[in-house]
Amino acid sequence: MFPHGRWITSFHRADHDREPDTGAARIGPYADPVTASAVVHSGDPAPTPPDRGRRTLLAVPGRGVLAATGGLAVYFAAPPHSLWFLAPIGFALLWIAVAGARARAGLGYGFVFGLAYLTPLLAWTGVFVGAVAWLPLSAAEALLVAIPVAAVAVVSRLPAAPLWAALLWVAGEFLRAVAPFGGFPWGRIAFGQPDGSYLPLAALGGTPLIAFAVALTGFAAAQLVVVFARDRRRVRPLAAPVLLTVLPVAAALAASAAVGVDANAGEVTVAAVQGNVPRAGLDFNAQRRAVLDNHVKRTEELVADVAAGRVPQPDLVIWPENASDIDPLRNPDAAEVIDRAVAAVDAPVAVGSVLVGDDGLPRNVVLLWEPGRGAVDTYTKRKLQPFGETMPYRSFFRIFTSTVDKAGRFVAGDEPTVFDMGPARVGLVTCYEVAFDDVVRESVAGATLLAVPTNNATFGLTDMTYQQLAMDRVRAVEHGRAVVVAATSGVSAIVRPDGSVASSTGLFTPATLVARVPLRTTTTLSDRLGPAPEWAMTVVGLAALAAALVGRRRKRKQEEVDVGTAPR
């Protein structure tokens, strides 16, 4: 890919990468020492090479291509493609594109990188409502990617630059997880790594540590190539990039020992019921009774399978989100069929439902339904999906499209809930919530098993459900818990504490999964540290950025002084 060091260094000598022309040469990691010496001694600018303009014109599109290719590489690293090793390669290409560039150039290349990564990743958001949702969301998220990449360009001249750059990438992911509209962390790098060597790091520092390791590997490897191409005769400058490239990979391999799978709180037989829906689309709620009947029927078929000895008797059963969008606390007919199914399976069932509050507004809930007792506990979804379950600035966005009126008016819950289901204490994370570190961390506290009821029918046959399953697998390792994923239309899965999938279903097919999984009370280091690693990485990254900006300002002032006192 890099046959000539001259090709690489030419990208870093482009006119738009130079400091403002003060009459003194910029002396930095990408400066030409001969030219710099001549300028300092003569006080006159060095002559521009005849082909300088041509190389400048080529540099911008060339870097843009590198940034776009890097973004696509990171996209193909994620499920369902699962070419996880492409992620550090993508960051390496991004580094070649932005290292040595000015901040505003880094912003532009970062935006290109973000578009190439997130536009195909988020294509599922427009499957039923069109580009009016998909493309603006992709562009907004790409802009939020561009901001930390601009900061990466600024710190790229510091010693150990890849280290500070990787920390700033983590800071950027933190930004996307909290803003706007409560954040949208769907494109976190960790969620593309459930099949990769970096996954064990989740048990130590959660998703931010995985992102840091992947970015550092890529940035440092690219820096190694650049340094080697610039001066092949000196070995010493290679030491830092070699160390920074190898260290995260070695740490990930060592972290595999921290991934616990032992059943220190016993074992439990779980069942995940996927009843399916009559058809996909935004009108799935209009099929409410059919969806409920599908889940009742599939549960009764599970009972028949148990009686025939084809599967073991489950200790607990998980139904998906929206399994009963008919409020069973207000509709006796819905309560009756759920009662019948729960009594037949003779085990507590977590029932995804929609309840209507006294204010007339809906709540997305999971009900704990016990044989002979009915609904005994409730978990209300806390993190609602903007532009889906809620609609921020509804009247404003209605100016552009009436589609906004299809968004719901759901009311969010305010606390995590753990269900006592047979021998297990089950933490609950509903669908969209699994993307948020703090929501999952709070839900796992005190739980021996994690359940993720979800409904992906709205998104049809897209990659969305596979991307979400990847998050479930990362969460299993991060918190050391088996995870039961029950989806209305698929993909449902049972995930072991090491992130491997014990069994899974296809899309839009009725199915039931039954498996024996471990119950665990052990808290991972990631649980104990909480958000501290992310905060620490963010603070250190921003401190490095501040140091780079202060250093650059001092250097410019010194250059102005040098130019002013130079003999003429």
Image (spheres, helix red, strand yellow):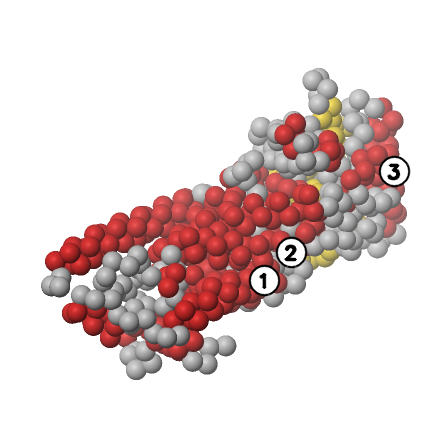
Tell me, yes or no, if residue 342 can be seen here.
no
Labelled pair 2, 1 in contact (Cβ < 8 Å): yes
**164 vs 8: above or below:** above
Labelled pair 2, 3 in contact (Cβ < 8 Å): no
N-term mark: 2 or 1: 1
Where is residue 152 shown, x and y percent of the image? 40, 56
**15 vs 229: above or below:** above
Pick the front one: 256 or 420: 256
N-term mark: 2 or 3: 2
Q: Distance between the residues labelled 2 and 3?
A: 33 Å
Callout 1 amino acid:
Leu
Residue tagged 1: 72
Left or right: residue 415 versus residue 375 is left
Residue tagged 3: 290
| Residue drawn at (78%, 47%) of the image | 489
Tell me, yes or no, if residue 559 can be seen here.
yes
